[in-house]
Image (cartoon, rainbow, N blue to C red):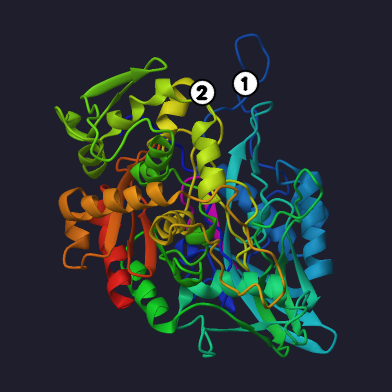
Amino acid sequence: MGSRGRRRGETRRNTNALVIGGVAAVAVIGAGVGAYALIGSGEPAGSTSASADDGKPEIPSGPPTAKEVRAAADGFLTAWQHGNAAKAATYTNDPTAAKKALADLTKDAHLTDLKLAPGTRKGAEVPFHVTSTVSYKELTKPFAYDSALTAERRKSDGKVFVDWQPSVLHPDLKEGDHLETGEAGDPPVKAVDRSGGELDTKKYPSLGTVVDGLRDKYGKTAGGTAGVELRVVRKQSADEDGKSEKNALPDKTLLTLSKGTPGTVKTTLDPKLQATAEEQVADRKKASVVLVKPSTGEILAVANSNPSFNTAFQGSLAPGSTMKVITASMLLDKNITDVDKKHPCPKYFTYGHWKFQNDDKFQIKDGTFKASFAASCNTAFISQAPKLDDDSLTKQAQSVFGLGRDNWSIGVPSFDGAVPVQSDAQMAASLIGQGGVRMNPLNMASVAATVKAGAFHQPYLVSPDVDDRTLAKAAKPISSSTASKLRELMHYTAIAGTAVKPMSGLGSDMGAKTGSAEVDGQKDPNGWFTAWRGDLAAAAVVQQGGHGGDSAGPVVRKMLLAGG
C-alpha cells in the first residue's frame, strides 16, 4: 500500500489459568530439577578486574556473560525463595520497586512454601518455575507457574542486575498490577447464549476474555455470590474526566480456593456461529473475526486465535483498504464522485511530499469510480485529498458510522476505532486506512452492517434492556442514496473485484471489501476483509496474513455461510 501504519496493542492474557500456567516457552524445567539452592557471593555480578592506561579501573561493557547472568539470577532467586525481599531487591536495577512488590506478594497474595527452580539460560534470560501454597484463613491450595527474568548490565559501573519488571513475579503482571488473595471483587458469572445455553470457555476458548469482561461489569448485579480467589488486580486507570477507562482490561482469576455462586448473564451470541468462529481462528495465527446482525447490531460471534487478548473487540490496527468504504461514503456525500463517474487511478500520486502507489503499480485508464473501488485503487482515493479538509474523514467516520467517539457500550470492554484529524501526507494515508487510523474487526463489521442496514446500529453483546444503558447513535444518519451506492460498490467488488473468490456463490444480496495494511517491521501486511450477506455482516483480520482476500476472506466466507 502507499503509506505505512503502526500497529498498536499488546497481547495480554485474560482467560482463567490452570493451577500450573504461565509462559509456555519457559516450560523447560526437567522433572529432576529441585528448588533453588543458596549459592553465590551475595553481591550483584560484575567486577573491575582490569585497569585502563590512566590507572582508573576499566568498566565492563557489552552483554552480560553467562557467569554474570547466572550470578545475578542465583542471588535474586535465592533471596526471594528465603523470603528476604530486601536482599532480593538488591540484585535488581530498581531495588525500591522490587522490594515493595516482593513484600506485597507475600502479604497480599498469601503465598507460602515458595520454591524456585531455574531453567536453561537463553542469553541474558533465565526462565524459572515457581511452586507455592496459597493460604487464606482455613483455605489452602497449591499454586505453580512459570516466569522468567532478564539480566542487564548497568552502564555506570558495569555491574549486572536483574532487569526489574512486574512480570518477573508473575507473567500476567503489568505496571501497577498486583496479585491478591481474598474474597473475589466480583461474584462469578455464567454467560449464556441467546437461547439460554451456557457458553463454556473450554468449548469456546475465545470467550475467556469476554466472560472476564462480563463479570467485571455485571458480577455485582447478576445475582451471584463471591468466592475466594487468587487474582491479578489490574491498575485502575482513568480518562481525563476521572472516569475509569471502559476498554481497560478486567481483573484475572489465577486460582480459585473456594467457588462462589455464579449469576447468569445472557448474551446475543449464537452457539452454532460461535463454534464456527472458533474453528476458523483455531488453525490460523493472529486471526480475529466478528459477526453481527445489521438490522439490530447484535453480536452473534467473536473469536481470536490468541485467546489471551480480545483483538476482535479491543484491537487497534490500521484497517487498510477496508477503510475505503468510509472514504467512499464521504466522497459520495460531498458529490466529489459518483459510482459510474470517470475517476482517476494513476500508477502514482504525490501528496504532502509522499509518493503513493497501487499494489503492483497498476493503473486504470479511463475507468469509473466503481472500477477503482472494486480494484482497490489507492491513488483513486489519494488523488482526492486536495479537495478535502483535514477533518473531513474524521467527521464522516464519527457522525455517520459512529466510530472514534469512545461511546460504544457493548457490555464488555471495547475499542471504538480512531480516525484522528491529520494533515498533508498522513491525512491522505488515512483515506486508504493507513496513517493514524485504527480499527478492529468489531468496528469494520459494524461498517459493513451500516452499509447493509442503511443505518448505524451500535453493536452490542448484552442487550441494553439488562441494565438500561444507552447505546451510541449516529449524529448524522447515512443518506439512502449513499447507502444504496455503497451497496452497489461493495456488491460489484464481490462479483468483479478483489473479493470475488471469497464471495463466490453467496447469492445476490451481498457485498464485500478487501484490505491489506502495512505495518512497520512486518514482512507481510495485515490482511482484512469485511462483508455482508442478507442480515449478517462480518469482518476479520489475519495479522501478517498478506492480501485480505486470501487470508481474511475465507474466514468471513465461512461465517456468512454458517449463518444460512
Disc 2: CA contacts within 10 A as few (<14), some (14-19) or many (>=20):
some
The residue at which mark 1 appears reads as 58
Q: Nearer the viewer, residue 256 or 515?
A: 515
Dot 2 amino acid type: Ser
Residue at the extreme front: 481
Q: Position of residue 169 (x, y in %)?
A: 67, 59
Q: Quadrant of residue 52?
A: top right
Q: Residue at x 38, y 38 (%)?
A: 332
Dot 1 amino acid type: Glu
The residue at which mark 2 appears reads as 423
Disc 1: CA contacts within 10 A as few (<14), some (14-19) or many (>=20):
some
122 within the magenta span: yes
From the viewer's perspective, is residue 114 above or below residue 552? Answer: below
Q: Quadrant of residue 374?
A: top left
How many angstroms separate mark 2 from mark 1 (CA)? 51 Å
Q: Position of residue 39 (x, y in %)?
A: 66, 57
Q: Secondary structure at mark 2?
A: loop
From the viewer's perspective, is residue 329 above or below residue 35? Answer: above
Q: Secondary structure at mark 1?
A: loop
Q: Residue at x 37, y 59 (%)?
A: 540
Q: Nearer the viewer, residue 77 or 236?
A: 236
Q: Residue at x 38, y 64 (%)?
A: 537
From the viewer's perspective, is residue 429 above or below residue 7? Answer: above
From the viewer's perspective, is residue 457 above or below residue 492? Answer: below
**Picture quarter with the N terminus:** top left
Task: Give the extent of the magenta segment.
Answer: 120-129
Q: Residue at x 49, y 68 (%)?
A: 29
238 within the magenta span: no
Q: Nearer the viewer, residue 287 or 323?
A: 323
Q: Position of residue 506 (x, y in %)?
A: 21, 68
